[in-house]
Image (cartoon, rainbow, N blue to C red):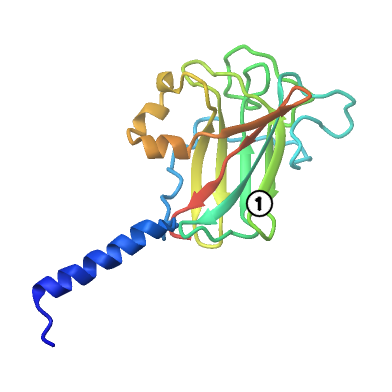
Amino acid sequence: MTLTRRHLLMGFTSVVGASAAIAIPVEPLTRRGTPQLTTGPFYPLDRPFDQDWDLTRVPGRPGVAQGVIMDLHGKVTTEQGRPVPGAILDVWQTNGLGRYHHPSDTVGKPIDPNFQGSAVIRADVDGDYRIRTVVPLPYERRQRHIHFDVRGEKRLLVTQMFFPGEPNERDTLFPGLRNEVLQRAVTAELVGIDNGVKTFRWNIVLAGE
């Protein structure tokens, strides 16, 4: 039998109908990389000896950092969703009083001697990372944010993480990400509160890794 255009269209329609009825979700083949943002003027110059995952305690000091304690965890992946094992994350932020541990910070807020200020950690074999810190205070015209310098095997990403439920549209950098998808990519997700400790999740995608 000779297949006419009508037969072909009928066959195509039946296949589409069958696929629609099954409605199998399809994972995107690629994901957008986390947007690049400025390092800022307060990259740490004088780091404490301790640079572990817990920024709320400093060895040799009995106290705990001032402010609202928070946990942050997530995964470093490629655009295809593959983990980046051993990715190095350099993290820094204001303390719970609104001050960077940096000599150029002249805002007048006090340094917290029990706050580590920064950390250099390594993701595990599954690309997972975790830090314990304090919720940073806004700094002048900046809203709450945490700085990240993330290094994979091939790529370097300098970016900043923002917090949900904040007036991020007033920030000096956040509105520059005019695409809503990009804004979501730099905003953490609040996943729970346990005994006053907030837990956030933020995944990082290294474009070109």
> Is 119 rendered above or below residue 97?
below
Point out the residue furthest to the top here. Answer: 108
Q: State the SS at label 1.
A: strand
Give the residue type at disc 1. Asp
- In this view of the protein, which residue sits in the foreground, 194 or 100? 194
Point out the residue furthest to the bottom here. Answer: 1
Horizontally, residue 121 falls left or right of residue 35, namely right
Horizontally, residue 25 falls left or right of residue 125, namely left
Q: Position of residue 48 (x, y in %)?
A: 75, 36
Q: Position of residue 128 (x, y in %)?
A: 66, 51
Q: Position of residue 72 (x, y in %)?
A: 66, 37
Point 61% across, 55% down: residue: 87
Point 74% across, 20% down: residue: 112
Assign the N terminus to one quadrant of the image: bottom left
Horizontally, residue 185 falls left or right of residue 45, namely left
- In this view of the protein, which residue sits in the foreground, 83 or 121? 83
Residue located beneath label 1 in the image: 128
> Is 108 rendered above or below residue 59?
above
Q: Position of residue 158 (x, y in %)?
A: 50, 43
Residue 199, picture quadrant? top right
> Is 123 rendered above or below residue 47?
below
Residue 183, picture quadrant? top left
Residue density around tag 1, few if under 14, some if 14–19, many if 20 or more, within 10 Å: many
Point 60% across, 50% down: residue: 75
